[in-house]
Amino acid sequence: MLPGMVRTDVINHLHVSLARCSFVYAAWLEGADAAGHADAYSDIDLWVDVPASAVEEAFRVIRSELEKFGTLNVEYHVSHPDPHLHQRFFRSAGLPEFWFLDVVVQEHARDITFGADDPVHVLFDRASVVRLTPSQDQLTMEIKRPAVALAAQRWRWVLVEKELRRGHRLEALAYYHEEVLAVLVELLRLRFCPGKQGYGLKHISRDFPETVVRRLESLYARTQLSEIQSGVEESARWFSQILSELIPERLDVD
């Protein structure tokens, strides 16, 4: 690492470099830096908004800036489910090994609004890209739609029951984690941190109240056939309770 180099220096270098590019409409930080709890192990989560035609040019600018600190030893492309988002991970040999730069270049056509509690730190915004604090109706719908979708997956929990009856412990355990607990965690995210869908167990100890984390730990610790059965039953009760809190008018919860 360069002498005296600190995390804010890296961010400032990227900020200045991107701000010089007229095709970059906005740049902001998410994750630990935006939330104010970055430590020596935290990624730097950088988002950039550009026209669709300038996506590769934006990555070129970022790559060039990072190479000033040392040779790049990681440039990993991620296939993102949203066609307007292009994600890559970078790491420079001249920076601490845990300082991955997680970059998402967003096509300007993408429409997004951040909730009041979403961690976002705007570096610059020339086109009012980063819109904050949606209306209460928007917030309600942002929670209801994915909650209904998660409830629709509940039928797959029967896959656990099938393997339990067969006495197949490993298969039952796999389905218990994938179909029951993973869906329960996503519903709990809607309840406690709706801006962080799709994170799974990442940052779970920070995102959820301690009592919720401990209850999840108990569910994940169940590995025997009888324990898995009781875990499914407890998960079902908890799922229904959280779903009724998110969608009070829903009457057909189990």
Image (cartoon, rainbow, N blue to C red):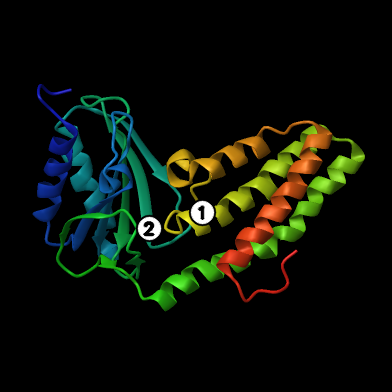
Disc 2 crowd rating (10 Å Cα; few below 14, some 14-19, many 20+) is many
Residue 76 figure quarter: top left
Identify whether 118 is placed above or below 14: below
Q: Is residue 201 visible?
A: no
> Image check: 47 left or right of 201?
left
> Image check: 67 left or right of 241?
left
Q: Which residue is mark 1?
A: 189
- How far is disc 2 from disc 1 in space, using C-alphas? 22 Å
Name the kind of residue labelled 2 in the image: Leu
At a point 29% along the width and 32% down the height, the residue shown is 39
Q: Which mark is residue 40?
A: none
Which badge, 2 or 1, comes first in the chain's sequence? Answer: 2
Disc 1 crowd rating (10 Å Cα; few below 14, some 14-19, many 20+) is many
Q: Which mark is residue 85?
A: 2
At a point 27% along the width and 48% down the height, the residue shown is 34
Residue placed furthest toward the front: 211
